[in-house]
Image (cartoon, rainbow, N blue to C red):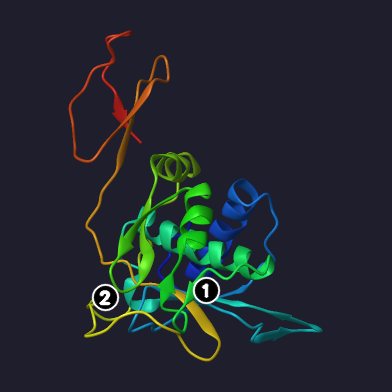
Amino acid sequence: MKETVKTSRTAGYLEKMFRALNQDFFNGELEEPIITIQSTPRAYGHVTVGKTWKRKDDWRHELNLGAETLERPIEAITATMVHEMVHLYNIAHEVQDCSRGGLYHNKRFRDEAERRGLVISHHEKYGWSTTEPSERLIDYIIDQGWTEIAMNRGYGWTPPPSAGGKAGAGGKGADTTPPKKSSTRKYVCPKCGQSIRATKTVNIICGDCMEQMQEV
């Protein structure tokens, strides 16, 4: 895969991720939005409630990922995308998953998000909004071979005085999850294919084959 060091490549990479996640986690039900990479000073990303982009004769929602947040681990980027995809799913099915001007994520959001490979915990101000990838989603990312994005605007995401809320006209459901440092590695036995995951570099041998397991 070509390095994601240009906005065109990065946008194409994110579109590829969206299509795979849509097919495997949403049964291909979501209408593909226009994916953008713009500054989101109050969140990692957002979707628009209305269809704000015109493409030929039809209109599409916008799904934005913050330009200053792309340097996060790929599992965090993926979790943010799935978070916003859940909002798109709920919009399409007329499920109100946020209140208080799009700030507070309710249990409807939580329940749908957890069905789609996320782990959701409660934030005092923003409700059921704190988003992490589940083991299922991490395994999926590893199997897809997705890697970190190699470009980022500025010096990374800095928590603002107040986070969340509508991101632009018609925006909703911004992912305001606080940043977490993460690294996930997969080790595979070259003989039998048995695999394990680790959060640090390890030196390990397959107990069945007595072969050195290799990082992939």
The residues bearing labels 1 and 2 have C-alpha atoms spaced at a distance of 21 Å
Identify whether 128 is placed above or below 45: above
Q: Nearer the viewer, residue 114 or 151?
A: 114
Which residue is at a point 25% across and 52% down the rendered structure image? 182
Sequence-earlier tag: 1 or 2: 1
* Left or right placement of residue 9 versus residue 5 in this view: right
**Towards the viewer: 147 or 61:** 61
Which secondary structure lies at badge 2? loop
Image coords of residue 60 (percent x, y)? 68, 78
Q: Find disc 1 in the rendering and name its residue.
A: 8
- Say above or below: 213 vs 137: above
Question: x, y (%) of residue 212?
Answer: 26, 19
Give the image quarter of residue 74. Answer: bottom left
Is any part of residue 148 visible from this angle? no
Give me the disc on residue 157: 2
* Quadrant of the rendering where the C terminus is positioned: top left
Q: Secondary structure at mark 1?
A: helix
Dot 1 and dot 2 residues touching (CB under 8 Å): no
Residue 101 visible in rendering: yes
